Image (cartoon, rainbow, N blue to C red):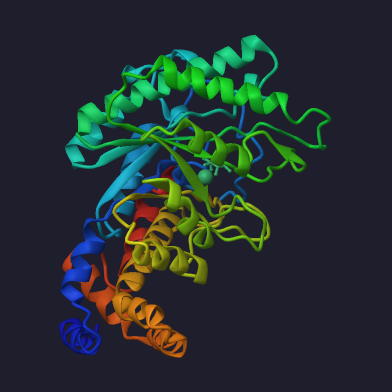
Amino acid sequence: MYDIKKGYELAKEYYAQYGIDVDKVIEICDKTPISMHCWQGDDVNGFEKKEGGLTGGIQTTGNYPGAARNAEELRADIEKAMEFIPGELKVNVHANYQEADTFVDRDAITEENFKNWADWAVEKGIGLDFNPTYFSHPLSEKATLSSADENVRKFWVKHGIACRKIGEYFYKRTGKVCVINHWTPDGDKEFPIDTLTPRTQLKKSYDEIFEATKDVEGVMDGIESKVFGIGAESFTAGSHEFCMGYVMKANKDHIIMTLDTGHYHPTEVVSAKLGAVYTFSDHVLLHVSRPVRWDSDHVVAFDDETKAIMEELVRLDKLEDTYIATDFFDASINRIAAWAIGMRNTRKAMLYALLQPTEMMKKLEAEGDVSGRLAVSQEFKAAPFSLVWDYYCEKTNKGVGLSWLDEVRKYEKEVLLNR
Ligand code: RNT
Ligand code: ZN
């Protein structure tokens, strides 16, 4: 290992030339929460005592050994991954990760079914976020909240209500706001003749969920849109326009947009949407993912778009107001390595964005010095960023460089391969 302290001292001098205080940057980066999705650990299957796999037009591919088979194993795996993830962390739980001795249907889940998650989070000192599971269920095959069948629609409204109450329970147990994400897979393989009724039904359902739980405290609600899913290639009820319209018209502090990086047309990027959304909203929920040709939910990479999203949040001064969550599921590699790589990359992109002379660039832009603006932003693409990243990982004891990989391999041999 090289002299990390020496590298850090040098980087500190480099960044100081541009008025950047590396220690201050590390502090901001470290305290900004990232919510890690629990569902990478078992391929979005969950632990309901019932048959049936993943549906809803999303897919995991691969059969790498060692997926968690129950909540205890999943929490142990999350704890292992946490050893390699620097910075404030939350854990994002889906409703199908309930724990019960016998099957409890989605409309009947209560805080009891999530007590172990809450106890664990309190013990670890972390916050919890939550998601209704409007998929992988016999009643979700055609449609959920947008269904024309009143029995089906009401079932899912009850599920949404149950989830908001569980969100409040998480808030009360952990003392940290619980961010709930609502995503329905409802859509159609072909373009429907009537594209309005499913939307008015979906709107009515969200209205009913929020009205019935209007006294719930400590919960934020993201409404997630999507352009298409497998089997819903031509139409989604919860399209971008629908969800944006719903959030803006609701005009309630707790109802916000969820922007998932895989949910738009291939040349459309979330980084370019943030400024517009923030003109009208105080908060945004982000699902950081990596779409490869479709909403494939590959492990988050340290790529241009992830960096652009973080740069935009820093430039908008919205890092604090944005709920950053990850959403990827890869079953073809070690699942703990997947978490470590994706979460480290998300955090790394945040640090990269913070280590830029944002004020200097803003000033140049305001003065009309567009040449200077371009020159400065390009110069920083090759700044000695990794020296600061290594120092940050060492300081927080989360593994410098690739040292975490040996630990993951050891855990694979000792734990995962024995499952
Ligand atoms: C699906 C959405 C949604 C899910 C999770 C599991 O396309 O992105 O957020 O990935 O609810
Ligand atoms: Zn998502």
Residue 66 is situated, as x and y percent measured from the top left of the image, at 46, 46
Query: Quarter of the image holding residue 350?
Result: bottom left
Q: Which of the 4 image quarters holds residue 408?
A: bottom left
Percent x, y for residue 124? 20, 41
Residue nearest the viewer, comparing 348 with 243: 243
Question: Residue at left 17%, top 68%?
Answer: 395
Quadrant where ligand 1 appears: top right
Relative to 104, is 195 above or below? below
Nearest to the observer: residue 415 or residue 397:
397
Quadrant the C terminus occupies: top left
Tell me where residue 78 appears, x and y as whole percent. Answer: 34, 46
Which residue does the image show at 18% across and 37% down from the upper left? 123
Give me the residue at 31% from left, 18% from top: 215
Residue at 41% across, 89% down: 372
Residue 106 can be seen, yes or no = no
| 356 w.r.t. 297: above or below | below
